[in-house]
Image (cartoon, helix red, strand yellow):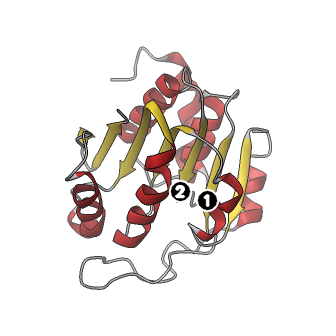
């Protein structure tokens, strides 16, 4: 579906080996970032891992600051009743390696540590685009609690692992959060959803 999008076809090979996110999801992230790039507001990604999708967004929208939140040391503790990932999963990364990978992306701003503790520096910002790939209930809930009130009208939030049986906490956090709100999560491709902020 991206065969006619030369920019994405150029960017994707740069990031393919630095992400677990498949091409169809990456193409959706790319498109939504480009749409949101026309809005006022910063960008953010929570759950950076090796920096693949962060680089995709940073390169697609070089005029937008993108705030990158991750422990850069693996997953935090999770609720074993709804989350299947364990503390330390995805620890095969580091802040230094991701900074090196994004060294030619001057719009990338790093916030290492546990979110939302690391969000104080951007508490006064408004956001046009936020990508959440945190895999577990509490982390998704924390992202929604922090970013949703700071999203500009027409801003876009994209969530990975929605409806994936291995990450049931993701769907639960999203559905619970939006149950009393105007926005409805829209499935964009398998195991991914997004919302437009009203």
Q: Residue 59: percent from the left, percent from the top? A: 65, 32
Residue 77 percent location from the top left of the image: 45, 84
Quarter occupied by the C terminus: top left
Q: Where 144 falls versus 113 (above or below)? A: above
> Image check: 110 left or right of 183?
right
Of residue 60 and residue 92, the one placed in the foreground of this image is: 60
Closer to us: 111 or 99: 111
Sequence-first disc among 2 and 1: 2
Which quarter of the picture shows residue 37?
top right
Question: What separation in Å lies between label 2 and label 1 (alpha carbons)?
Answer: 5 Å
Q: Residue 8, how many percent across, how many down?
A: 51, 26
Residue 24: x %, y % from top left: 35, 37
Question: Is 151 on the left-hand or right-hand side of 176?
Answer: right
- Comparing 117 with 34, the one in front is 117
Say which element carries label 1.
strand
Q: Do the residues labelled 2 and 1 touch (CB within 8 Å)?
A: yes
Q: Tell me which residue sits at (51%, 71%) in the image.
A: 90
Question: How many residues crowd mark 2 within 10 Å: few (<14), some (14–19), many (20+)?
Answer: many
Could you tell me how many numbered marks the image carries?
Answer: 2
Name the residue carrying label 2: 46
Q: Residue at x 29, y 63 (%)?
A: 173
| Residue occupying the far top of the picture | 4
Task: Using a 10 Å C-alpha cutoff, classify the residue at mark 1 as few (fewer than 14 neighbours), some (14 to 19) or many (20 or more).
Answer: many
Residue 69, label in figure: 1
Which structural element holds mark 2?
strand
Q: Which of 35 and 151 is in front in this view?
A: 151
Name the residue: 25% across, 77% down: 82
């Amino acid at each position: 579906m991206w065969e006619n999008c030369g920019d994405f076809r150029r960017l994707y090979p740069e990031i393919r080996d630095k992400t677990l996110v498949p091409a169809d999801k990456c193409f959706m992230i790319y498109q939504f970032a480009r749409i949101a790039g026309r809005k006022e507001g910063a960008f953010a990604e929570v759950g950076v891992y090796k920096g693949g999708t962060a680089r995709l967004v940073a390169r697609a929208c070089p005029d937008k600051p993108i705030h990158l939140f991750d422990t850069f040391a693996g997953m935090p503790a999770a609720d074993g009743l709804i989350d299947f990932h364990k503390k330390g999963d995805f620890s095969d990364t580091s802040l230094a390696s991701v900074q090196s990978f994004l060294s030619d992306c001057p719009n990338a701003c790093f916030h290492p540590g546990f979110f939302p503790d690391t969000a104080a520096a951007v508490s006064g910002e408004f956001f046009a685009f936020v990508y959440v790939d945190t895999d577990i209930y509490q982390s998704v809930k924390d992202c929604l609690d922090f970013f949703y009130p700071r999203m500009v009208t027409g801003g876009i939030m994209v969530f990975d692992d929605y409806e994936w049986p291995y990450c049931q906490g993701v769907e639960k956090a999203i559905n619970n959060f939006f149950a009393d709100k105007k926005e409805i999560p829209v499935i964009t491709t398998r195991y991914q959803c997004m919302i437009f902020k009203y």
